[in-house]
Image (cartoon, rainbow, N blue to C red):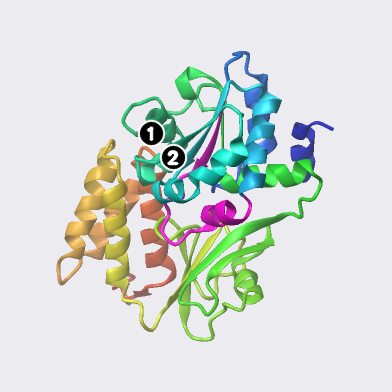
Amino acid sequence: MDILKKLEKEKLTGRGGADFPTHLKWKIVNKAKDKDKYVICNVSEGEPDVEKDRFVLENYQKEMVSGIKIAIDFLEAKEGFIYLRNDYYSKFSLQLKYWISDYPIKLVREEAGYIGGEETALIEFLEGKRAEPRVRPPFPPTCGLFGKPTLINNAETFYCVDLINRGIFKHTRLYTINGDVENPGVYGLDEDVTVKDALKETKNLPKRKFFVQVGGGAAGEVLGKNQLNVKVCGSGAIIVYDARKTDIKSLLKKWIEFFMKESCGKCVPCREGIFRIYELLQKPNTDLKLISDIVYSLEQSSFCGLGRGCALSISSLFVNVLRKSKAGEVIL
């Protein structure tokens, strides 16, 4: 059985956040008529408080590289790239070169920041251009690096590819649990685990009043303590906030400052909208209605996932956690 059939049989989905069926992505690249193909392993991991890629590099580096080699061989790719967050490059590049050996795989040090994790912005960076998202379609599997078919998966996905190829995949995935918890860390749990069960199994379910952010420490969805019977989504992160000591305005400022720093500035809704929210948060009496209007604009018209991720975190916080007045207005 070839690797494509194995991936389909095990129903592996991408571990980077989109949850797209891995075998379909590989199949599209494989069927592309162009002979020059590329493979990219995205290890940028720019989402705050998410550490699973680091965990893979510390514990399963050989398996990750093996998964990349399997992809290169199957697709008969011209070249592979491992795009590493700056500090990961400094720490792990020598070990990675050992496992790469004589395979045509290049290590690339991240310089593009958080936006470089967006796959088309990553491609722009590898082509020597400014890291900005591209218009899609076309999508990378048909028209990616240098206009050629390109397979992009993240570190954990390639690690899983190696396990599947060896017949030892157990349908688990890696979850980062951080924040106001007793046992923070990265855990291997069932790939369909709910937020509540993940916290229970790791002995991190708080007894006090709390809320969580699922999927990332900036772009993740915020859920109240009674909304936890849902599958962990996105990059597999659960950030727990103690409701008694978390200052909501400070939390909003933290998110907005992160997105201001990491925005590429390409689209107006993201560039101007995020800055306007930042301005509003500096005022003693914050206009939450105006913030909600800007968030809606971000959600509907941002060019890429960065603006929409910012909108998701704020809107879900407003809807699921904050109190409302009798008139239905959110109270900060």
Residue displayed at 42% across by 72% down: 321
Q: In which quarter of the image is residue 179?
A: bottom left
- Left or right relative to 316: residue 232: right
Q: Looking at the image, tell me whether mark 1 or mark 2 is earlier in sequence order.
A: 2
Extreme-bottom residue of the structure: 208
Which region shows up in magenta? Answer: 38-60
Q: Which secondary structure, mark 2?
A: loop
Residue 12 visible in the current orientation: no
- Left or right relative to 65: residue 318: left
- Left or right relative to 295: residue 48: right
| In the rendered image, the vertical position of residue 286 relative to residue 209, given as above or below | above
Q: Which secondary structure, mark 1?
A: loop
Whole-percent x and y of residue 314? 36, 60
Picture disc at residue 234: none
Residue displayed at 45% across by 49% down: 88
How far is disc 1 from disc 2 in space, using C-alphas? Answer: 7 Å
Residue 174 visible in the current orientation: yes
| Crowd rating for badge 1 (residues with CA inside 10 Å; few <14, some 14–19, many 20+) | many
Picture disc at residue 118: 2
Picture mark count:
2
Say which amino acid is labelled 1: Pro
| In the rendered image, the vertical position of residue 206 relative to residue 111, given as above or below | below
Residue displayed at 17% across by 58% down: 279
| Crowd rating for badge 2 (residues with CA inside 10 Å; few <14, some 14–19, many 20+) | some
Q: Mark 1 points at which residue?
A: 133
Say which amino acid is labelled 2: Glu
User: Is 303 one of the magenta-colored residues?
Assistant: no
Residue displayed at 68% across by 47% down: 160
- Which one is nearer the viewer's eye here, 108 or 92? 92
Whole-percent x and y of residue 110? 39, 41
Q: Do the residues labelled 1 and 2 touch (CB within 8 Å)?
A: yes
| In the rendered image, the vertical position of residue 293 relative to residue 177, given as above or below | above
